[in-house]
Amino acid sequence: MKKVLLLIVLLTFGFVQPLTAATFTNEYPFYVVKQIEIDRSVQDPKEIIHHVIEVLRENIEQSSWGYFQVISSNDGMEPLPVNVIHCPPNWVNGQLESASQIELISDKDRQFIQDLGGQYGVTLPWNISVFSTSDMLAQMISTMPNSEFEIPVKNYIMVTIGNPMLTSKVAYRDLDWRTNMEINQHMKNTRTLLKNNVERILTNRTNYDWKKNNNPMYNGMLKVTKKDVDALPADKLLPELLVSKGKDDVASAYTQYVRKMYRWCTYPGTQLNWISKMTTAFFDAMFSWEDPNQPFDLDMSDMGGPAIHFDNLEDAKTKIPALLDNMYGPLWAGNMVSQPWQYMRRFSVDFDGDVDVVEMYSAYFADIMTASGFHHAPALPCMVGFRVGEIPDTCNSCDCDTPKDEEPGDSWPEDNNRRIDPVQGSFINMYAAEGTLRFAFKDVTMMMQMMDMPVQLYMFQIFPDYIYNELAALANGAIQQTGRPERFELVKFSEKY
């Protein structure tokens, strides 16, 4: 009997543990594959980045024997096709840094999306980023109070991937144990294949002296734990809305609406253009507020905004929620946004074209996100998903005059326009900004705490809901264009904070 019990324990430890590894194993957000040291006085980081990303794009499919396919789309920004994403340059630690990305998908990924449900489409595709950076550890030590250490600052080009195991840990946690096992193994294989193929291409197709990365800061510094994941319910990570309109109709309306909002926000002298400038001024001033015990003043009246005064940070915390509601609530309720969102591309992530993903960038919000380092690039851009859905009770969404609580019966005439069979609708969902900042930017919040930056930490905490409202407003505007009444619910800051 003891032997049987021992065998059960051993089998449980050896077999069940891998099934739950995605849930219980701590994971870095990113994985740096290789790095090279560069001399900025004689080498142009941007030129190297563009060269390396093109070499990866041109060789990854062949290197993986067709396992990985590069995402490419003729629907998006110029020039076409869109098969490389160049992030807007940004100042990091006093230097102008750059990053470029390609994104990949496999047939195994498409099969999982088809089997599991399209709501997981926004967790794809896989990202390979090439970025420039200085030695972050040396920079951090030099900025520490009373630091006596002086470390020569080196400069690097790094090639990094978004960690597929983090995706498994965060997005697929509520699946049954058997499916979790399959997903977990697939993610492990994906990470290994990505790493091995990228290493092979860098070694054989470029002439740079690639080295291993020994600094975990570029992997995200802090691993994401089960406690981190449990703090954000799964339904909050992938919020979705069922719309009584076909997927292609809604997705096309969305792409058109984002383009229209972008033009309105960027056209000089328009109301949205002034709001965009006002928003930039507000966030810039808040993130630059150094002493939380000193007053804060910002006059935006010349842009059509308010004159803002806070006695100190505690005063700001009591006023900012209502301030955001008053400044932006009517804007979002009217399906408009405070920044131009650049529509990048739309592509399918399943075999049948039933699940599409749309990628978007806000240059200003991307600046905020990457100001702490371009190793966060794999967490960008923002994703909104569209998938085929089914309206279970058609009469709740049709235009007939039959009472909705009336059951079908023989008394109905054959030509009655009441439809009782389910009809096609669509789901819209997104990968919530709260999840992105909680998991991929865990190092940023830790650094803000270490460096005593309470104002910036507070703004970073409310930032995800701001981004959510922006994307929800775009989605609501697109849905309205299709003539349907469904709406994403907007966050009201004065109620939540």
Image: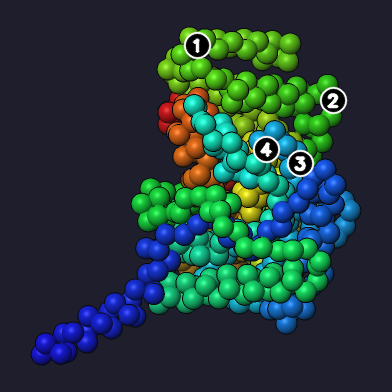
Rounded to the nearest whole Å, what is the CA distance between mark 1 and mark 2?
Answer: 35 Å
Element marked by disc 4: strand
**The disc labelled 3 sits on which kind of residue?**
Pro
Using the image as rendered, state which of residue 153 and residue 264 is in the foreground.
Answer: 153
**Residue 129 occupies quadrant:** bottom right
Number of dots carrying numbers? 4
Rounded to the nearest whole Å, what is the CA distance between mark 3 and mark 1?
Answer: 32 Å
Return the x and y of residue 75 as percentages of the image width and height. 81, 57
Rounded to the nearest whole Å, what is the CA distance between mark 4 and mark 3?
Answer: 9 Å
Rounded to the nearest whole Å, what is the CA distance between mark 2 and mark 4?
Answer: 29 Å
Q: Residue at x 74, y 63 (%)?
A: 209
Q: Quadrant of the C terminus?
A: top left
Element marked by disc 1: loop
Residue 268 has which mark?
A: 2
**Residue 386 occupies quadrant:** bottom right
**The disc labelled 2 sits on which kind of residue?**
Pro
Q: Residue at x 69, y 26 (%)?
A: 280
Residue under numbered circle 3? 89
Element marked by disc 2: loop
Q: Quadrant of the N terminus?
A: bottom left
* Label 4: how many Cα within 10 Å (few below 14, some 14–19, many 20+): some
Residue 92 has which mark?
A: 4
